Image (cartoon, rainbow, N blue to C red):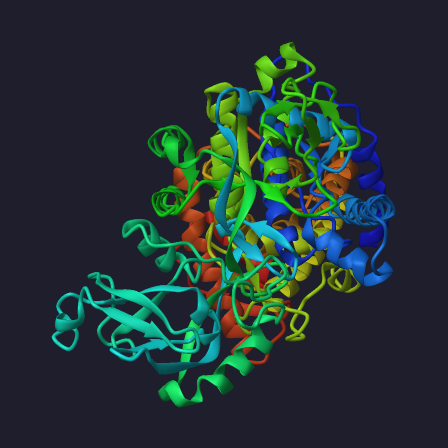
Amino acid sequence: MFEDIEKKWQNIWENKKRDYDGDILVIDTPPPFTSGTLHMGHILSYSYIDFIARYKSLKGYKVYYPQGWDAQGFPTEIKVEKKYGKLPKEEFRKKCIEWSYEMLSNMREQMKRMGYMVDWNNQYITMEPEYHRKVQESIIEMWKKGDIYRANHPVLWCTNCKSAVAKAELEDLEINSILYDIDFQTITISTTRPELIHACVAVVVNPNDDRYKHLIGKKAVIPLYNKEVPIIADKEVLTDFGTGAVMVCTYGDKQDLEWQKRYNLPVIEGIDKDGKLINSKYDGKNIEEARKLILNDLKPYIKGSKEYKKIVKVHDRCKTPVELINSYEWFCKVKDYKHELIEIAKKIRWIPNFGIYHYIDWLNNLDWDWVISRDRVFGTPIPFYICERCGKIDPADQLPFYPKDEKLCECGGTMKPEQKVLDVWVDSSITPLVISKYWEDKEFFSKAFPNWIRIQGVEIIRTWALYTIYRIYRLTGKIPWKEILLNGNVLAPDGRKMSKSLGNVISPDQLLKEYPVDALRQWAAMSGALAKDRPFSYEDIKYAKSFLIKYWNASKFVLSKLRPIKNYQLRKVDRWILHKLSILVKEVTEAMENYEFREAVTKLQQFYWNSFCDYYIEYVKWRFNNNQHVDGAVYTLKTVQEVFSQMFSVFAPHLSYEVYYQITGKEIDKWPEFSFEDIEAYNEVEKFNKIVSEVRTYKIKNRMSIKQELDEWKADLSEELKEELSKTLNIKRVI
């Protein structure tokens, strides 16, 4: 039953013509990676987006809600390599494109099935030439402003993916390691990375460490290499780490890099881009192989060792520990604009408001600028030529740019096209401009930008939010959106992150075999506070399905009672439910304005199931059975059902539209502005409801059916409500 209704309305919505004349409200949606299937995190995030889009549409806004697809980068290459193996560059790229189109096609159908009112005529795909052109044009524009530069600089490097990565692409991983104490003749140092001993350029101790004060300024000798290095003092050395003396290797970690710059120490590159040792006695060996050989050779110098747990930074895509490697890469100047980026972010409404502090903390802790180049195939090409002789850089003059032909430099040297591609966050950080038609329609752009709202996860504030604010600010001088709404992650029911390896992944496709679409949508609304991680709840989705069944059955009852009415008279119970409905409209409207979806859907469910079904519908049955006071009941039933369905359609559009259409013969096209007040009747019936509950409880305790007759019941009620009690619960006399 539900599936037929879902297909009917999905087809209607998909073919509905969009009107963007006049003012529009623009939603900047996350372009998901084209993995081939939506996960529960997608369902949560995109349901939030759709709640807003549907609510604002009913409030009279022309909502512009396109969908994008993040189709490039490491994840796709990894999957295609796994399927097809190593291929020539162009053939490999074609396979990546084919795979991505297949995957996004599957995901698009899933989104349609969820009832998302996306404008599919304006979707964008980051791997397409037109999108490449826009990204490249934006990069050239920033380069002309001086914001993009190329430099030989230490970068975080994934030796598995063979590419630079940004700090935001790292995860912390705790590993079991061993801390070795190694004799450097005059001093014993501690290290977990003996394989880097050949790149040692100094030994550092704390100036307040009494054990080593007499050694500061003297020399230590590196075993195996018999090379002298200075012993220097720095307050950042931890006296309780190992022996309290550590070696400085130029690119060992971030701290080593800071010490190298602070004390102008020599530079020795210890590991190459393939993760193999260089400038050592063990050149060509990978890190693991070299460590075993070096530890064997260091046996005479190892004074002690102990097991040690440490946190290493790994690439989030492949979980490989990253290294600091010196490399020619492309960078965006972010650090120079730290103050401006904080001030402009304050002009945006952050929901919840603590989200901005994640943003500010990340900005304040940046170590260096954003490295935007990647040594991969499937990405947007960096649109520049570089002269081999003089180093001159020229932007591509024909866009979209794909690196093929060389050209002659003014110096007589050869200008070669850059072979690296851009970080995928460079692609997605211009989505507000792309959907606002910045490059092709200035009139549309003037009314679409800044966008109204961006919806995204908390964990990508440091990437998507920051990079978008930065890029849009440097390209336009403005904020990208007026509001940013943050959602958390969906965890497994056991509270852990969903993972295939843990076997705790819950698939929306699997759920949809048992539950209606509108149940999944209600689950998303019921999932709790914004920006908080929350475990998936089967109880919530079961309740959501039960509620839909209740709603549908009650709707059939209402529909069966509808008839033409003229001069209706409202009884106290009618006036009570209409007063309560009026309160509901105000409360749900306020909740929706503040994006409090759980508050809104909970109030709707409680009103309908408890007040309307459990009480009001039971109150009016006798009126239809006895053909008394019918017109007032018909008016009230129809009004409640229409107004409720209008609001509930935000969360459960399929069933709400069907119910509303069956009652009115029309589609839902506006948010209700219903108002009705009768505080006296409201208070009187609230008291009456308690008496009804008491009678019901009495009958249940005495093993009577609800329909079984009682001789009498004492209740302090008006004559009208005495009649209501008598007729509803089959009581001969109410005194």
Decide: is 185 above or below 513. below
Query: How many discs appear?
Result: 0
Decide: is 170 above or below 13. below
Whether residue 21 is visible here, answered yes or no, is: yes
The single residue placed furthest to the top in the displayed view is 443
Viewer-proximal residue among 156 and 496: 156
**Residue 74's spot in the image, x, y percent?**
68, 52
Viewer-proximal residue among 173 and 543: 173
Q: Would you say 584 lies left or right of 258 here?
A: right
User: On the image, which quarter does residue 286 sit in?
Assistant: bottom right
Quarter containing the N terminus: bottom right
Viewer-proximal residue among 419 and 344: 419
**Residue 690's spot in the image, x, y percent?**
44, 60
User: On the image, which quarter does residue 647 sit in?
Assistant: top right
Q: Would you say 515 lies left or right of 316 here?
A: right
Whether residue 734 is visible here, answered yes or no, is: no
Residue found at x 68% / y 13%: 441
**Residue 238's spot in the image, x, y percent?**
24, 70
Residue found at x 28% / y 76%: 241
**Residue 317's spot in the image, x, y percent?**
62, 59
User: On the image, which quarter does residue 21 sit in?
Assistant: top right
Viewer-proximal residue among 145 and 153: 153
Residue found at x 63% / y 45%: 374
Quarter containing the C terminus: bottom left
Q: Would you say 536 lies left or right of 505 here?
A: left
